[in-house]
Image: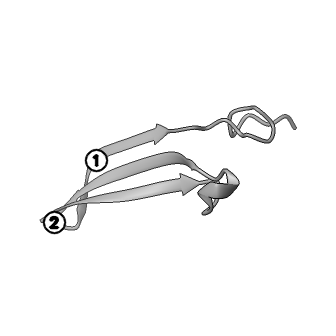
Amino acid sequence: MRQIILDTETTGLEPAQGHRVIEIGLVEIISRRPTGRTFHRSLNSVCARFGRPFGQWSA
């Protein structure tokens, strides 16, 4: 059986407060084994508070 596993990363759970989806990922599985086929995409990844992409913070 073929399955597609979906994973999302969000900034929160309240769209009314400005929370949004920032990443999406998929993995294909056939007969309970990963096939190696994957998909990953960053979406809306600019932090509204600081105006910079997530992951680009100075030390």
Question: Which corner quadrant holds the C terminus?
Answer: top right
Front in this rendered view, residue 49 or 36? 49
Q: Residue at x 57, y 37 (%)?
A: 44
Instruction: Describe the element under mark 1 as helix, strand or loop.
Output: strand
Q: Residue furthest front?
A: 16
Of the image marks 1 and 2, the number of the one nearer the N terminus: 2
Give the Cα distance between marks 1 and 2. Answer: 13 Å
Which class describes the residues within 10 Å of circle 2: few (<14), some (14-19), or many (20+)? few
Q: Position of residue 6 (x, y in %)?
A: 37, 57
Number of the label disc, if any, that sits on residue 56: none
Residue in front for this viewpoint, 11 or 6: 11
Quadrant housing residue 45? top right
Question: Which amino acid type corresponds to the residue marked 2 in the rendered image?
Answer: Ser
**For the point 35% across and 51% down, which residue is it?**
26
Location of the N terminus by quadrant is: bottom left
Could you say whether the residue bearing mark 2 is in a helix, strand or loop?
Answer: loop
Mark 1 near mark 2, Cβ–Cβ under 8 Å? Answer: no
Q: Quadrant of residue 55?
A: top right
Q: Residue at x 79, y 42 (%)?
A: 49
Instruction: Identify which residue is drawn at 48% across, 55% down.
Output: 8
Identify the residue under disc 2.
Answer: 31
**Relative to 37, is 14 on the left or the right?**
right
Q: Where is residue 4 in the image (x, y as percent from the top left)?
A: 26, 57
Q: Which amino acid does label 1 sit on?
A: Gly
Looking at the image, residue 6 sits to the left or right of residue 3; the answer is right
Residue 28: x, y in percent?
26, 53
State the residue position of label 1.
Answer: 36
Rendered view: 32 above or below 38: below
In the displayed structure, would residue 36 be above or below residue 14?
Answer: above
Residue 53: give x, y in percent of width and height. Answer: 68, 33
Foreground residue among 53 and 48: 48
Counting other residues with Cα less than 10 Å from the Cα at mark 1, is it few (<14), some (14-19), or many (20 or more)? few
